[in-house]
Image: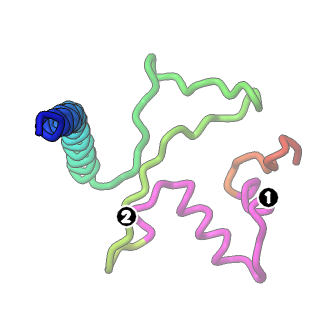
Amino acid sequence: MGSLIGELEAREAAARARVEALEAELARLAARLGDEREARSRLRSARETVTEVITDLGGSGAAAPVAGGAEPENPVHPGVRVVGVITVPHWRQGLSAAVLPDVYRHIIEVLADAAKPMQAKQIMPRVGLPAVTGRGGS
């Protein structure tokens, strides 16, 4: 009978080792979950703050000024103004084009006046932007 007790003790030790390994993994996952929850909370807070600021600005979509007040230089197309980040409010019932940034309103006007569908390269010059393809050419 000694061998049966020894076998049970060995199995118990193996089960204890598996439980300890799983508990250690669970502790690592719990710490990771806490970190991810904190990151999610910070992102939610940032989004809510940005939404509040945009709402307070009247949803004008104005881009934040560049340090020093100058517009950044465009390394790909020298002499071409860099538009930067433009915030477009999420669409909701009753929202008009008046809340859009100027360049977007100009695009809508160009399309409304068009007699037929237009390609982006046809629209861009009419709103004061260069007609550049993804390959870098016109």
Q: Mark 1 is on which residue type?
A: Lys
Q: Dot 1: what SS? A: helix
Left or right for 110, reference 32: right
Left or right for 10, reference 85: left
Q: Quadrant where the N terminus lies?
A: top left
Q: Dot 2: what SS? A: loop
| Image position, residue 3 (x, y; %) | 18, 35
Q: Determine the residue positioned at 84% across, 44% down.
A: 135
| Image position, residue 5 (x, y; %) | 11, 37
Q: Nearer the viewer, residue 52 or 20?
A: 20
109 lies above or below 30: below
Left or right for 102, reference 35: right
Q: Residue furthest right?
A: 137
CA gap between label 1 and label 2 equals 26 Å
Q: Determine the residue positioned at 64% across, 35% down.
A: 81
**Mark toward the start of the polypeptide (1 vs 2):** 2
| Image position, residue 120 (x, y; %) | 74, 61
Q: Determine the residue positioned at 69% across, 49% down.
A: 128
Q: Nearer the viewer, residue 46 or 90?
A: 46
Of tags 1 and 2, the one toward the viewer is 2
Q: Determine the residue positioned at 73% across, 29% down.
A: 79
In magenta stretch: residue 115: yes
| Image position, residue 30 (x, y; %) | 18, 38
Instruction: Check disc 1 and report the residue beneath it.
Output: 121
Q: Nearer the viewer, residue 13 or 125?
A: 13
99 lies above or below 131: below
Q: Residue 90, which numbered label?
A: 2
Q: Residue furthest front?
A: 1
Asked if residue 104 can be seen in this view, the reply is yes
Instruction: Tell me which segment is drawn in magenta.
Output: 97-126
- Marks 2 and 1: in contact by CB < 8 Å? no
